[in-house]
Amino acid sequence: MTAPTTAPLLSDLMPWSVAPLRLGRGWILAPDAASLTARWDTLIRATGAERAALFRPTRSRTPHSAVTALPGQPTGTGRFARESGRCPKPLRVGHGPFDERYLIPDHRLIDAARPELWRVADERQLFAVEQGFVVGAAGPALLVSALLPDGRSPAGRPGRIRPLFRRPGGAEPNMAPGLVESLSARLGHEVTPRRLLDWAVAVALPSPRGCVVPLTADPDLWATGVELGAELTGIQLRGAHGGERRRLPGGRRPYVRAAVPARPTTIFYGSEDETLHIGDGRISPVPVEAWDFQVGGVRMIELWFERRAQRPEPGTLEAIGPLVWPQEWTSELLELITVLALLAGLRSRQRELGAALDHGPVIGADGLRAAGVLPVPDAARRPASVLDHHEEGPDGQFALI
């Protein structure tokens, strides 16, 4: 299935979007929380020019930058050059597609934190993460995260982050005004924001114009697509929001056959026996579809490993990390294999859905214009005003709202 030129863009269905986070310094992100605390403590013990060098100043952030509080995080707003306290509790975030890391949630350390994203991040929120377009690259065009995502693209091309709700508590869906009502009337099904997101996950296609979401006018096909999308979304959410962590059937679940060594440097996949070799460690069975799973033309398992096996420059804060391969990383790798294998197992159903869309009745952008859904009002593309309390400004002063 190719992206039809008449189909609406995701940007017209979910109009409010946020650019990916721009961290500015790598040391504030790590696969484990303990490394971040150790890095912070090392930085706090340093003074003067040494602290400035370890901080890695940029045009946006230096130890003397004056910044507001990061919404929802109890971190300081005094100049970091005067900071002497403990490390804020590291926060689990989504790091690009299918990776999870810990971040020091301190606005003084992040070049572009996108505060409007943090204001709506809560236990009800889901984030649709549009992947950057790469010509000819394999992989999904749209992913979903319950964790606040950094929006990083494995191919270096930025996508967009689209929260499902514009306000905390699951209030005010990030949908074009009148869209769900129009689709409900046309399809004879109750179209909710979550079901529309599930549909988009099942059918979204990449294009140079942005992520394209074909819409069917067939009620039965709509129901089929929503059901498939709910499966795809549930796998990606990994048990968040009270959901179930999906598992491969018995006999196909990956297990550690030989322990991963203390400091592995190589990764290799043997398709004959479906074995993943991490140094001298072995994990099997690993379906070839999981090993070959790509986003933006990049293999996800290889990228996941390379990020943890790389050796940062000595003397930098990034160099502070585990001395040996933690057991938790192996557990995370097993889960990653499971997620990718389950998603790959649904590709045939996605292809069948796409073929049915190609030959069935559709609702194109012209149809949405005729229904008054398009064009989207400018206000729907801007963040909602969600502040019901004062946010702390630089040096402890209240920000003026």
Image (cartoon, rainbow, N blue to C red):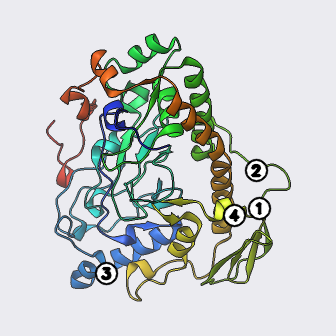
Report the Cα–Cα distance between label 1 and label 2: 9 Å
- Extreme residue toward the bottom, this view: 314
Label 4 sits on what residue type?
Answer: Val
Residue for badge 2: 248
Quadrant that contains the C terminus: top left
In percent of the image, x 57 and y 40: which residue is there? 233
Q: Left or right of 400: which side holds 113?
A: right
**Circles 3 and 1: CB distance less than 8 Å?**
no
The kind of residue tagged 2 is Leu
Residue ID for mark 3? 46
x, y percentage for residue 15? 30, 34
Q: Residues within 10 Å of mark 1 (few under 14, many from 20)?
A: many
The residue that disc 4 covers is 288
Residue situated in front as seen by the camera: 265 or 262: 265
Residue at the (32%, 68%) spot, across then down: 84
Mark 3 crowd level (few <14, some 14–19, many ≥20, 10 Å Cα): some
Nearer the camera: disc 3 or disc 4:
4
Mark yes or no: residue 138 visible: yes
Q: Secondary structure at mark 3?
A: loop
Q: Pointer 2 and pointer 3: residues touching (CB < 8 Å)?
A: no
Q: Which residue is mark 1?
A: 254
Tell me the CA gap for discs 3 and 1: 44 Å
For residue 326, above or below residue 377: below
Residue beneath the point at 80% across and 56% down: 252
Q: CA distance from mark 2 to mark 4?
A: 14 Å
Three-letter residue code for mark 1: Pro
Distance from Cα at disc 1 to Cα at disc 4: 12 Å
**Up/down of 203 relative to 322, above or below:** above
Q: Is residue 35 left or right of residue 79?
A: right
